[in-house]
Amino acid sequence: MKPIIHSIAKPVRVGLPLVLAVGILWWMYRGISWEELADALSHRMSWTWMLLSMPFGILAQVLRAMRWRQVLAPAGERPRLSTCTHAVFLSYASSLVVPRVGEVLRCGVLKRYEGTNFSTGLGTVVTERIIDTVLILVLSLLTFLTQIPVFLTFFRQTGMSLSSLVERFSLTGWVVTLLCGVLAMFAIVFLAQRFLRGSGLLRGLLSVLKLEQPLLFVAYSVGIWVSYYLHFYLTFFCFDFTAALGPAAALVAFVVGTYAVLVPTPNGAGSWHFAVKTVLVLYGVGQTEAAVFVLIVHTLQTLLVAVLGLWSMMALSLRRK
């Protein structure tokens, strides 16, 4: 019975996010002609700015590999930086096929090529994600405080108003939500007790408290998100209809897009397009122009992730031989 369930679960795990992404993209672009897209690529787009943005996408992943290597050191693991970089490249590329699988994959790469303890590596990845979550929450708060009118309009137009969500909740809805929260807390405690006890996972989680150069860790963390932002912001100069929006508008779109990629689709496809397009429209960009912008930018940045992953796959295969 279990082999049958696994054989069914795997295609669902791969196919469902893809179907969701395709559905959202079809809904968004059903009224746009290929002529408009071709015109934007050939006449309205500056490829120079797009090429200038790409190194920052690579730099963000390299800095992530350098930070990861630093966090692994207090746990007694010292893999080569090149292997860490290849593992990060592969993690992002693999998530294009199966969302969220990359974090586990990069720990497996270190175990295979460097002998790093898998549980320890996974613990450091979880620690990194916690740090990143705190940073993006702080960035979101600062962005929200400086751009309150834009966010309020965004929530209103997308139906995400807090008051409207509260009004839609019935007593049953609140009870179910509360029960789900309680069950989730019990599940977290249960899993923590089961997997942290006597394993390398706890050692990896706590390794950030024993860093030799904590300021360097902070510099890596800030550098990662600054690079991500520049990777996105520089693409604004590729088109005449976004070039004049400024860094504040790009920051709002960047923050909203960061949350949108949490939806389990390949690289946030569909959800990212919708969220960023909505922000651009709020800043005065036309519906068609905004849709063309997000489609081109997301496609080219996704291709960069795929190319880096393929390069790392070939590099590691040659190293193995």
Image (cartoon, grey):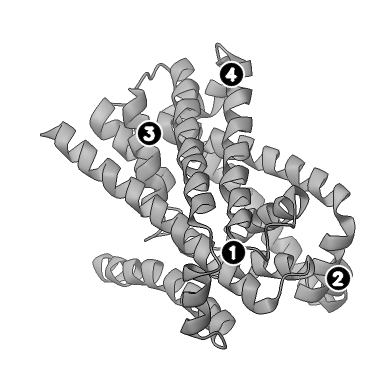
Q: Quadrant of the N terminus?
A: bottom left
Q: Is residue 275 visible?
A: yes
Q: Amino acid at mark 4?
A: Leu
Closer to us: 312 or 187: 312
Q: CA distance from mark 4 to mark 3?
A: 18 Å
Q: Quadrant of the C terminus?
A: top left
Closer to us: 138 or 122: 138
Q: Of callouts 4 and 1, which one flags the residue occurring earlier in the amino acid sequence?
A: 4
Q: Secondary structure at mark 1?
A: helix
Q: Is residue 20 visible?
A: no
Q: Residue 19 placed where, x, y %?
A: 44, 77
Q: Secondary structure at mark 2?
A: helix
Q: Amino acid at mark 3?
A: Thr
Residue 272, labelled with which disc?
1
Q: CA distance from mark 2 to mark 3?
A: 44 Å
58 with respect to 229 (left or right)? left
Q: Of callouts 4 and 3, which one flags the residue occurring earlier in the amino acid sequence?
A: 3
Q: Which residue is mark 4?
A: 216
Disc 4 crowd, CA 10 A, few/some/many (<14, 14-19, 20+): few
Q: Which residue is mark 2?
A: 166
Q: Of callouts 2 and 3, which one flags the residue occurring earlier in the amino acid sequence?
A: 3
Q: Of callouts 2 and 4, which one flags the residue occurring earlier in the amino acid sequence?
A: 2
Q: CA distance from mark 1 to mark 3?
A: 26 Å
Question: Most extreme residue toward the top, as rendered?
Answer: 212
